[in-house]
């Protein structure tokens, strides 16, 4: 859905589930289990490549993708800069902002003011296939932020978001990984997994089933039971 307001496009994605309920359920899981569920369903390359981790190891993120496409550019054209205004106004409650950067290394491509504006419009976290700055501010405001590295250099005049809510590519474990608006983004201290939109609920339910089995298996293993018997009974090890 696209609406033109004050010359800036507002692109909003309609979900077919309650975002708060689904988020709370995903946040009880962990990235390895979500990845395992995707593998079981035939999706073998849905993890971002190694190096994308939270600013704080306890941070987790879960929500439908709000995609942002950025490029390296020396331009200081305010018309390009103002694309961000439409971007923030397009955000809805529960989304996770995910930005491609085309491998740019020149600056910090996401910072505290961007996070503040995004959070005010319902965004619950950010995954940057590049760098952040203002890290201490992001940590202090408890805004889950995932990135590859940190860089204090200003982005304006070096890097710019030029479009949003379109399919983007980020670095994946097996080459480029496509992320569509609405795909489910899940991340913890092990990395970030992208769940195709149409598999959001199926992956969640399978992972929850395995999570319960793992809890039983873990408890029995701790008692010293024969590992073969435990695996035969619960199927997770």
Image (cartoon, helix red, strand yellow):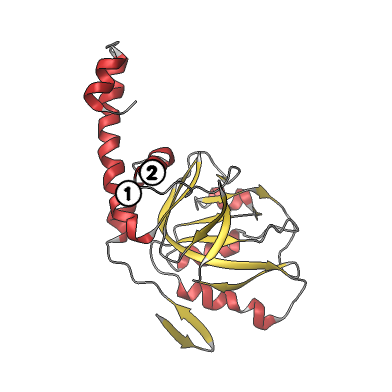
Q: Which quadrant is home to the N terminus?
A: bottom left
Estimate the x, y position of residue 164 in percent, counting from the top left: 53, 72
Q: Which quadrant is home to the C terminus?
A: top left
Q: Residues within 10 Å of mark 1 (few under 14, many from 20)?
A: many
Which of the 4 quarters of the picture holds residue 108? bottom right
Identify the residue at image location x=25%, y=39%: 209
Camera-nearest residue between 131 and 217: 217
Task: Identify the element where label 1 is drawn.
Answer: helix
Q: Which mark is residue 34?
A: 2
Task: Identify the element where label 2 is drawn.
Answer: helix
Give me the C-alpha separation between circle 1 and circle 2.
7 Å
List the single residue furthest toward the front.
42
Q: Which mark is residue 59?
A: none
Estimate the x, y position of residue 23 in percent, counting from the top left: 34, 53
Q: How many marks?
A: 2
Camera-nearest residue between 115 and 137: 115
Estimate the x, y position of residue 225 in percent, counting from the top left: 27, 12
Marks 1/2 in contact by CB < 8 Å: the verdict is: yes
List the single residue furthest toward the right.
74
Identify the residue at image location x=72%, y=54%: 152
Estimate the x, y position of residue 72 in percent, counting from the top left: 72, 66
Answer with mark 1 or mark 2, whichever residue precedes in sequence. Answer: 2
Camera-nearest residue between 163 and 237: 237
Identify the residue at image location x=47%, y=87%: 4
Relative side of 182 to 213, left or right = right
Q: Residues within 10 Å of mark 2 (few under 14, many from 20)?
A: many
Q: Which mark is residue 203?
A: 1
| Residue 11 vertical position relative to residue 191 in the rendered view, above or below | below
């Amino acid at each position: 859905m696209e609406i033109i307001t004050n010359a800036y496009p507002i692109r909003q994605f309609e979900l077919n589930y309650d975002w708060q309920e689904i988020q709370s359920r995903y946040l009880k899981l962990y990235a390895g289990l979500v990845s395992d569920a995707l593998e079981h369903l035939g999706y073998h390359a849905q993890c971002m490549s190694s190096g994308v981790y939270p600013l704080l190891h306890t941070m987790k993120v879960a929500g439908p993708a709000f995609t942002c496409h950025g490029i390296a550019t020396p331009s200081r054209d305010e018309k390009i800069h103002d694309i961000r205004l439409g971007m923030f106004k397009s955000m809805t409650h529960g989304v996770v902002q995910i930005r491609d950067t085309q491998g740019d290394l020149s600056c910090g491509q996401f910072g505290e003011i961007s996070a503040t504006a995004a959070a005010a419009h319902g965004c619950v976290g950010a995954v940057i296939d590049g760098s952040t700055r203002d890290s201490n501010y992001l940590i202090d405001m408890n805004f889950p932020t995932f990135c590859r590295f940190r860089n204090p250099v200003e982005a304006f005049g070096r890097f710019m978001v030029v479009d949003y809510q379109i399919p983007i590519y980020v670095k994946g474990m097996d080459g480029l990984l496509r992320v569509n608006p609405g795909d489910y983004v899940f991340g913890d201290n092990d990395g970030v997994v992208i769940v195709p939109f149409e598999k959001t609920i199926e992956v969640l339910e399978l992972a929850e089933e395995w999570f319960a089995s793992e809890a039983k298996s873990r408890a029995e293993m701790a008692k010293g039971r024969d590992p073969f018997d435990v695996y035969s009974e619960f199927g997770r090890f």
